[in-house]
């Protein structure tokens, strides 16, 4: 990764982490894109894993794993498996010793490896505590590589225009950086690819009718227009979470509530149709006849990095 001069805002944040490093007695060569070692307080680790609902079926990857606490806690307390990577050889050795001491060395493993060169495709949950510019450096790759539905949980820093699905702030006793010993937790679900032109047929009144949905996507945000019987209407309450999609739309005086799951170029789900106080449910199967790129796919890493300038 090419080194660049840190822009103002990021430099301040980097300095905050660096001050933390110095406060904890660790020297660090701080530069743009080099995240120094600062521990996530244990109560923040626990809350991050709660928010991501980490359980026995999960595979957790921590990029920049420090003493291993994210993956070790996920393995020890929630029965998950996973690995962490860190550039610092001593921290990697410490993390593997900690995993052995706590009896989870078979499920929590740590490697000395650059996070930018780490294959993350096995993750069902990814944890990060990295500088904001590093989050933006890895964003394109995470969106392209992680399976839809993978949960990402970040300590303190966001992903620029990729807004979190959920965000909270909490007391972080013992935190050595930032102001007032508080931490932010930000949470995303990797969105499936929903953009495109979708077709389906329904017989809401006994007569078959054709529906065409033009769906635009930017990260997990979707918007679209539904055409049927020569009329068109914007969809309301659109929501995309991983592969799960839902929206509401008014069709000929009836309210259609669609919920379904996108699998490749098909959606399978159901639609609840309500009119005059009565409602009924029908199966919903849609086929994608045109695939469009989500808007975020046009942003490369250089463009993403400008989001913090
Ligand atoms: C802020 S600490 C977070 C440690 C741990 N994940 C936690 O939350 O307690 C960031 C860690 O990332 C590591 N790191 C920085 N750049 C890295 C890179 N390119 N590849 C792998 N690890 C890196 C640092 O050595 C440091 O241990």
Image: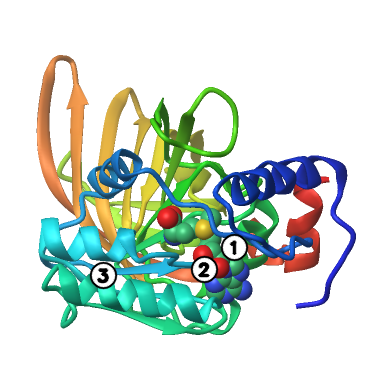
Q: CA distance from mark 2 to mark 3?
A: 28 Å
Question: In this image, 169 relative to 69: left or right?
Answer: right
Tell me the tag on residue 261.
none
Q: Secondary structure at mark 2?
A: helix
Q: Is mark 3 within 8 Å of ligand 1?
A: no
Q: Quadrant of the N terminus?
A: bottom right
* Label 3: element kind: helix
Q: Position of residue 171 (x, y in %)?
A: 39, 26
Q: What residue lies at 17% left-to-right and 65% top-to-bottom?
A: 75
User: Would residue 74 appear left or right of 18 to someone viewing this image?
Assistant: left
Determine crowd level at label 2: few under 14, some 14-19, many 20+ residues with C-alpha closer than 10 A.
some
How far apart marks 2 and 1 lie (CA) works out to: 5 Å
Q: Which residue is mark 1?
A: 139
Q: Quadrant of residue 204?
A: top left
195 or 228, which is in the foreground? 195
Nearest the viewer among 170 and 160 is 170
Which of the two residues, 70 or 192, is positioned nearer the viewer here? Answer: 70
- Dot 2 or dot 3: first in sequence order is 3
Residue 110 percent across, percent down from the top left: 36, 79
Q: Is residue 291 visible?
A: no
Which comes before the other along the chain, label 1 or label 3? Answer: 3
Q: In the visual, does 256 lie left or right of 93?
A: left
Find disc 3 in the rendering and name its residue. 98
The extreme top residue here reads 277
Q: Quadrant of the C terminus?
A: top right
Q: Are marks 2 and 1 in contact (CB under 8 Å)?
A: yes
Q: Which mark is residue 142?
A: 2
């Amino acid at each position: 990764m090419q080194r660049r001069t840190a822009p103002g805002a990021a430099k301040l944040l980097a300095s905050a982490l660096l001050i933390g490093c110095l406060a904890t007695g660790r020297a660090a060569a701080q530069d743009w894109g080099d995240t120094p070692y600062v521990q996530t307080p244990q109560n923040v680790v626990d809350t991050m894993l709660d928010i991501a609902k980490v359980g026995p079926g999960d595979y957790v990857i921590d990029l920049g794993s420090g003493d291993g606490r994210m993956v070790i806690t996920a393995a020890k307390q929630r029965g998950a498996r996973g690995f962490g990577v860190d550039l610092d050889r001593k921290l990697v050795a410490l993390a593997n010793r900690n995993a052995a001491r706590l009896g989870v060395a078979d499920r929590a493993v740590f490697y000395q490896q650059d996070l930018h060169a780490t294959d993350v495709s096995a993750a069902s949950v990814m944890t990060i505590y990295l500088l904001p510019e590093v989050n933006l450096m890895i964003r394109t790759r995470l969106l392209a590589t992680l399976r839809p539905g993978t949960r990402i949980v970040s300590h303190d820093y966001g992903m620029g225009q990729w807004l979190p699905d959920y965000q909270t702030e909490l007391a972080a006793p013992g935190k050595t950086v930032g102001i007032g010993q508080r931490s932010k937790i930000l949470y995303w679900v990797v969105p499936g690819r929903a953009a495109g032109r979708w077709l389906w047929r329904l017989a809401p009144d006994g007569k078959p009718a054709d529906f065409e949905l033009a769906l635009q996507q930017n990260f997990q945000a979707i918007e679209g227009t539904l055409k049927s019987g020569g009329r068109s209407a914007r969809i309301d309450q659109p929501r995309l979470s991983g592969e799960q999609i839902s929206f509401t739309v008014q069709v000929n005086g009836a309210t259609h509530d669609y919920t379904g799951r996108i699998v490749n170029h098909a959606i399978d789900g159901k639609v609840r149709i309500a009119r005059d106080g009565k409602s009924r449910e029908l199966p919903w199967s849609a086929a994608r006849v045109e695939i469009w790129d989500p808007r975020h796919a046009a942003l490369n890493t250089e463009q993403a990095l400008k989001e913090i300038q």
